[in-house]
Image (cartoon, rainbow, N blue to C red):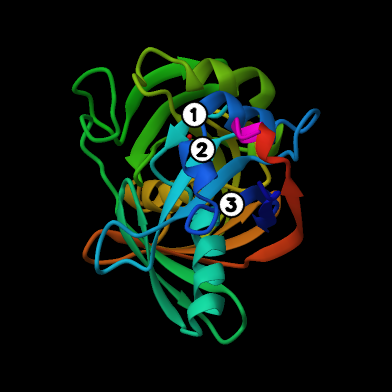
Amino acid sequence: MNAIPFIKMHGLGNDFVVFDGRRDSVVLDMDDATAARIADRKTGVGCDQLIVIEPSRDDDADAFMRIRNNDGSEVGACGNATRCVADVLMAELNRRDVTVQTVAGLLEARGLEDGQVSVDMGPAWLDWREIPLLKAVDTNHIPVSVGPLSDAVGVSVGNPHAVFFVDDAEKIDLEKYGPILEHHDMFPERANIEVCHLMAENRIRMRVWERGVGITRACGTGACAVGVAAARRGLTGRTVEVVLDGGVLGIEWLADDHVLMTGPVATSFSGVLHPSLFGVH
Ligand SMILES: N[C@@H](CCC[C@H](N)C(=O)O)C(=O)O
């Protein structure tokens, strides 16, 4: 069997190994352990998330996107990877508008004149059962407290986020507190952890500890969650810029509760993997 091609892409430094399962069906059966091996930065290609573009399961979508974290676990959403996959599909179909299907729903994406991609990430989910949380609490003031971090805002954008507003996000030891909060009892499906502060009017500095990964240079759904959380707390309007380690994302919480995320897409290189990695000899 032939080698299996992949593309290495990133959105603001949040990086992905992208496979095309429409052409290489062997990647469709990938298990968690294989995904983790490929994602491992020491022994594999290395990435934050591993993405498989699959045939669409809906007439209204151009393709289905499967998302796995660096630890191999499958997840419902990834904002930065959605922009990357949309960019691949737009080039392939020679269109400016595409629809990407994920387990969380259908996401409409549009390519802008300046090369950035805008994605409607769907509605922000704010009920404690939807995030999900352990019990019925006010999701605008979740009673969790670890070190200097307390009083989180919970938001799901197809995946769970806990947003902490602090005086200075740079000073928070995310390596220490991120994993404790990710695995906190309050979050039965674990959570992505964002720490942030207001830099200027409608401009927010954010750092992230991603579930199943660790610290990353950017998290698209995290930026969506932060934009929603800041508006819920009355700290900003519904249109903000979120400044991540890797750059800036534009976030708009629309009147219909959908969250629009706009940012860049980049391709780093392409390569091939031996089919035996996928159990084919
Ligand atoms: N990097 C992503 C989020 C990926 C999934 C997340 N780690 C989770 O476990 O929910 C993004 O850009 O949104």
User: Looking at the image, is 27 positioned above or below residue 71?
Assistant: below
What is the C-alpha distance between the residues marked 2 and 1? Answer: 5 Å
Judge the density around disc 1: few (<14), some (14-19), many (≥20) Cα neighbours within 10 Å.
some
Helix, strand or loop for disc 1: loop
Q: Give me the residue at 62% from left, 55% from top.
A: 243
Quick one: 209 or 88, which is closer to the camera? 88
- Mark 3 or mark 2, which is nearer the start of the sequence? 3
- The amino acid at mark 2 is Arg
Q: Which residue is mark 1?
A: 73
Residue with the mark numbered 2: 68
Q: Which is nearer the N-term, disc 2 or disc 1?
A: 2
Amino acid on which the number 3 mark rests in the picture: Phe
Q: Which residue is mark 3?
A: 19
Question: What is the x, y in percent for residue 238?
Answer: 37, 62
Residue occupying image coordinates x 37% and y 68%: 62
Q: Residue furthest top?
A: 185
C-beta proximity under 8 Å, tags 2 and 1: yes
Residue range highlighted in magenta: 277-281
Q: Identify the mark nearer the N-term, 1 or 3.
A: 3
Foreground of the two, 279 or 191 = 279
Does residue 278 belong to the magenta stretch? yes
